[in-house]
Image (tube, rainbow, N blue to C red):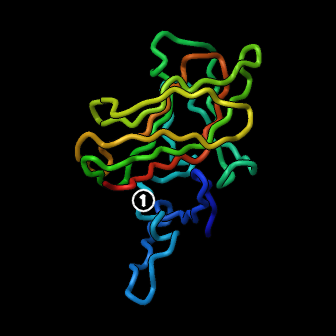
Amino acid sequence: MMRFVLLGAAALAVPLVAATGQTPAPATASAPRSAEAIFADRLSNDPRAESLRPYGQRIPPEVRTDKTVQFGKALRIPISGAIPEFGRIGVVTPTLKPVRKGDRIVIAFWARAQRTEGDAPGKICRSQLEATPVVRTIFEQPFDITPEWKMYKLIGKADQAYPAGGLNAAFHLGCAKQTIDIGPVFILDYGQ
């Protein structure tokens, strides 16, 4: 099954490599690598909403069917109000491949905000690439989120080498009364 993702101006074919465990065939001298194979090499996590790991709420949020977002699923996270330590409510997705020092990492994710106070933009207080298990931020950025599905991205570099599972893309959400839907999240490693 092939789906399409729009990253910048380029449309890239996205196989569910992380979900299926299939590895694209290597290129040969007579057959150059396809865009699908190149994208599969860059994809460092399982992008599906079902693979997101929510934390910080007594009743975990649920993955919902939503045909208007890529892959047709989204995690809906209701936030009853701002909390002083906004990072206590959020979502993470781990890397499944090692990352080298200096690699350019792009985190691209689908999100939308619902039920905000006074129709204000939704807030992702902080999106970050973080080391784990001892959490340490590598790079971060806050986002204002629209009520319509939109792909957002943040870009940075790995400060050192990490094994598979040594990094998470994390989204801290506890800074406003709102409902945030998060669709597919892609951690892409563009190398040196």
Residue plotted at (26% across, 51% down): 100
- Rendered location of residue 3, percent (x, y): 63, 63
Disc 1 designates what residue?
Answer: 42
- Horizontal relation, residue 102 to residue 35: left or right: left
- Whether 104 is drawn above or below 116: the answer is below
Query: Between 171 and 161, which is closer to the camera in this rendering?
Result: 161
Location of the N terminus (image quadrant): bottom right
The kind of residue tagged 1 is: Arg
Quarter occupied by residue 43: bottom left
Residue plotted at (43% across, 33% down): 128
- Whether 133 is drawn above or below 188: the answer is above
How many badges with numbers are in the image?
Answer: 1
- Whether 58 is drawn above or below 43: the answer is above
- Rendered location of residue 157, percent (x, y): 34, 42
Query: Between 57 and 24, which is closer to the camera in this rendering?
Result: 24
Residue plotted at (45% across, 76% down): 33
